Amino acid sequence: MLKGEAQAVSADAVGVDAALPRVVLFDFDGVLMHGDAFYLFMRERYRRSWWRPLLALLSTPLLLLQLPFSRRLPARVLVRIALLGLGERHYQAAANAFAASLARRPRQFCRDGLQALRRHQAQGDRVIVVTGCEHTLVSGVLQQLGLTDLEILASQLRTGWFGMRPLRHNVGRRKVQALAGHGVTAWQVAYGDSIFDVAMLKPATEAVLVNGTPALCKKVEKALGRAITRVEWF
């Protein structure tokens, strides 16, 4: 290929890239919402049942045995107790009902984060919510908040013999894997709030840490090997 032709092809490629919308990633818990939506949902499941707390109490020896090996194993047991007896249809109904009530709670959601997301949408960016929250729940909350035209990559449950159970927890490196499976291999901006978001923040042209303490900011910058953008959102 002649030099002039190569330059023309390169210019065309740049033009195509410039025409594509920016890809912007948002975490959900701690970025768009104060707190953890799925934890609140699980707590509500226990609050509304007399026998779930009792079963969890009876499971204490098992939970204590698991704890030295992993914090995730006891959490999974407690989630399974909270979802015991719920098939897929009933789970979706319960999750959507809780999403509606959660969306009505005052000061539960991050006003600045929601405004930032809407600005990106207004600018024509491709906005993807990449979260460890469960898919039905986070989708219901976002719909209740009037946020549409969003792509959502979230944790998944599956049906089991005794109710819904965890299938895939979309955290850490799994967020990047989910994005790759979704056909997204590059993004320009990513908003996160914890050290667990480093895998998602690192490939971004601009990595944004939301409401990070000085110690957390330092830890994230060390993991990324570069400076980050810090924002205080309320």
Image (cartoon, helix red, strand yellow):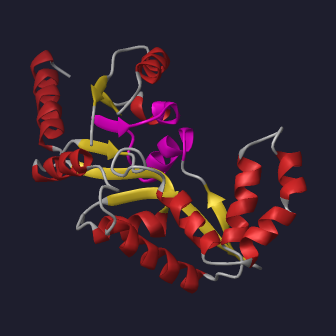
Q: Is residue 58 visible in this depiction of the protein?
A: yes
| Residue lying at 29% horizontally and 60% vertically, measured from the top left | 150
In the rendered view, does 122 fall on the left or right side of 84?
A: left
Looking at the picture, tell me which residue is in the foreground, 23 or 104: 104
| Residue lying at 43% horizontally and 77% vertically, measured from the top left | 96
| Residue lying at 64% horizontally and 83% vertically, measured from the top left | 87
Q: Position of residue 232 (x, y in %)?
A: 27, 33
Q: Provide the residue span drawn in magenta.
A: 171-198
Q: Is residue 205 visible in this depiction of the protein?
A: no
Q: Is residue 219 above or below residue 21?
A: above
In the rendered view, does 73 fall on the left or right side of 86?
A: right
* Magenta-span inclusion, residue 183: yes
Q: Quadrant of the C terminus?
A: top left
Q: Is residue 74 above or below residue 92?
A: above
The mark total stands at: 0
Q: Position of residue 63 (x, y in %)?
A: 83, 52
> Residue 12: which quarter of the image?
top left
Q: Quadrant of the N terminus?
A: top left
Looking at the picture, tell me which residue is in the foreground, 128 or 134: 134
Q: Position of residue 34 (x, y in %)?
A: 39, 49
Q: Position of residue 141 (x, y in %)?
A: 36, 66
* Magenta-span inclusion, residue 165: no
Q: In the current view of this chain or complex, which residue is farthest to the bottom?
A: 89
In the rendered view, does 199 fall on the left or right side of 64?
A: left
Looking at the picture, tell me which residue is in the foreground, 129 or 188: 129
In the rendered view, does 100 fall on the left or right side of 23?
A: right
